[in-house]
């Protein structure tokens, strides 16, 4: 089992990757990751500010990785003028199912 990292070691790693300072502030890291494990994690990470518009395409997403459950409620069934994910149903902002009939 690896040992935890010291405050000095964490500071050294954060100095090379300052975008992690905010997310890690206040977290208790002692015993969580070794210095080598954290350095590997930092080296392979990409922050949202590092991504160019359109950089993440469907070819780069695993099949089934984005589900309706993972889409925030604010992006579902918006007003008629708002592009959003439409759930199936008979509500005013929902899409009708393929077997929907009018009576």
Image (cartoon, rainbow, N blue to C red):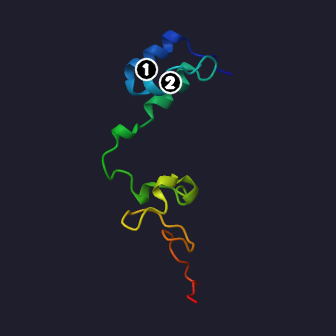
Mark 2 vs 1: CB contact within 8 A: yes
Image coordinates of residue 31 in percent, x first then y, are 64, 18
Please tell me which residue is depicted at 57% across the width and 15% down the height of the picture.
Answer: 5
Q: Secondary structure at mark 2?
A: helix
On residue 14, which mark appears?
A: 1
Please tell me which residue is depicted at 42% across the width and 59% down the height of the picture.
Answer: 59
- Would residue 56 be found to the left or right of residue 41 on screen? left
Please tell me which residue is depicted at 53% across the width and 60% down the height of the picture.
Answer: 63
Read off the residue under disc 2.
Answer: 24
Image coordinates of residue 87 in percent, x first then y, are 53, 67
The answer to which of marks 2 and 1 sits earlier in the sequence is: 1
Please tell me which residue is depicted at 36% across the width and 66% down the height of the picture.
Answer: 81
Looking at the image, residue 49 lies above or below residue 98: above
Q: Quadrant of the C terminus?
A: bottom right
Looking at the image, residue 80 lies above or below residue 44: below
Q: Nearer the viewer, residue 66 or 2?
A: 66
Crowd rating for badge 2 (residues with CA inside 10 Å; few <14, some 14–19, many 20+) = few
Image coordinates of residue 71 in percent, x first then y, are 51, 54
C-alpha separation, residue under disc 2 versus residue under disc 1? 9 Å
Q: Nearer the viewer, mark 2 or mark 1?
A: 2
Looking at the image, residue 77 lies above or below residue 70: below
Q: Nearer the viewer, residue 34 or 101?
A: 101
């Amino acid at each position: 089992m690896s040992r935890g990292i010291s405050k000095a070691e964490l500071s050294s790693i954060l100095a090379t990757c300052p975008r992690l300072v905010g997310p890690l502030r206040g977290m208790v890291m002692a015993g969580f990751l070794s210095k080598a494990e954290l350095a590997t994690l930092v080296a392979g990470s990409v922050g949202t500010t590092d991504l160019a518009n359109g950089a993440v395409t469907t070819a780069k997403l695993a099949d089934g990785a984005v589900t309706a459950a993972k889409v925030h409620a604010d992006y579902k069934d918006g007003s008629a003028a708002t592009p959003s994910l439409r759930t199936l149903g008979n509500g005013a902002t929902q899409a009708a199912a393929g077997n929907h009939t009018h009576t």
